[in-house]
Image (cartoon, helix red, strand yellow):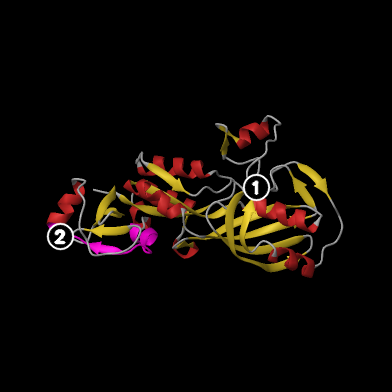
Amino acid sequence: MLGFLNIDKPVGMTSHDVVAVIRRGTHIKKVGHAGTLDPLATGILIVCVDKATRLSEFVMAHTKTYEADIHLGIETDTYDVEGSITRTDERPISRQQFEVALMGFVGDIQQIPPMYSAIKQDGKKLYDLARQGQTVDRPARPVTIYTLELLNWSFPHAHVRVVCTAGTYIRSLAYDIGQGLGVGAHLANLRRTQSGNFDLANAVPLDTLREAMAAGDWERYLLSPEVALADLPRVNLSVEQSQMVQQGRFLALDCQGAVVRAYDSDGLLIALLEPYDSLWKPMKVLV
């Protein structure tokens, strides 16, 4: 078993909740998600099934696209609608002011993660410290915002589209935009619409998947690794070369790239290879 489920996650569930549903429904123990979504958020959650868990890093590294509702004039301790209000400011902001503020966040920026996040600092998760009433200094992290555009304006609400690198916190982005405007803001709603080559067009609602798991035909929603790895170069191996890869031996190949997909003579993906001096080293063996 080697593939991905592109789940349209419903609101109110953690990413771990979704994984637990799929483990129970498929009776497969090795299941994991690639890229966490907060309970507040909906949309694309990529779930790796069985051997595909070994490929999660390649899914998580891809560019993400979100649609977000930002509520101006109210700050919360979690930077989203589920937190406690820490500040309010009723001063009006114009559409032009908001769009100018957005321009300052496009490109390579430094972002401070929210206290209510799963990032560990000194061995402790930030949200555990936050629930104990503690606030600690968090080092800023580099992220890239490729696109940040206003889709709809109805003050104090703004609906925006964000295309960004993995690891970007949209909650922090909403907070920082509010700080830049001087009135504060929080994230009121969030939907992930694309993650790498996965989008809503090939996503399955969790309730639909539950029905398929109960009926025993859920595998029709399993997506090939090629969807996640399509950007990597492909190399076809001979029978002898395939055996060498499965034995962990290095190959002399005429190909280029930081990582390449290796297929056996039957056209099955058997490994990912990485360069090692003038040879190619098995990085992930999938058989």
Horizontal and vertical percent position of residue 118: 57, 40
Element carrying mark 1: loop
Which segment did they paint magenta? 225-239
Q: Position of 116 compared to 75: left or right? A: left
Q: Which mark is residue 238?
A: 2
Q: Residue at x 68, y 63 (%)?
A: 159
Horizontal and vertical percent position of residue 107: 61, 63
Can residue 235 be found in the magenta stretch? yes
Q: Residue furthest right?
A: 91
In the depicted view, which residue is nearer to us: 253 or 179?
253
Given contact means CB atoms under 8 Å apart, are the residues at marks 1 and 2 in contact? no
Can residue 268 be found in the magenta stretch? no
Q: Residue at x 69, y 54 (%)?
A: 174
Horizontal and vertical percent position of residue 126: 61, 36
Identify the residue under disc 1.
Answer: 112
Element carrying mark 2: loop
Quadrant in the picture for residue 91: bottom right
Q: Residue furthest left?
A: 240
Q: Amino acid at mark 2?
A: Ser
Q: Which mark is residue 175?
A: none
**Measured Cα–Cα span from mark 1 to mark 2:** 49 Å
Horizontal and vertical percent position of residue 146: 58, 65
Q: Amino acid at mark 1?
A: Ile
Query: How crowded is the residue under tag 1: few (<14 C-alpha within 10 Å), some, or many (20+)?
Result: some
Quadrant in the picture for residue 25: top left
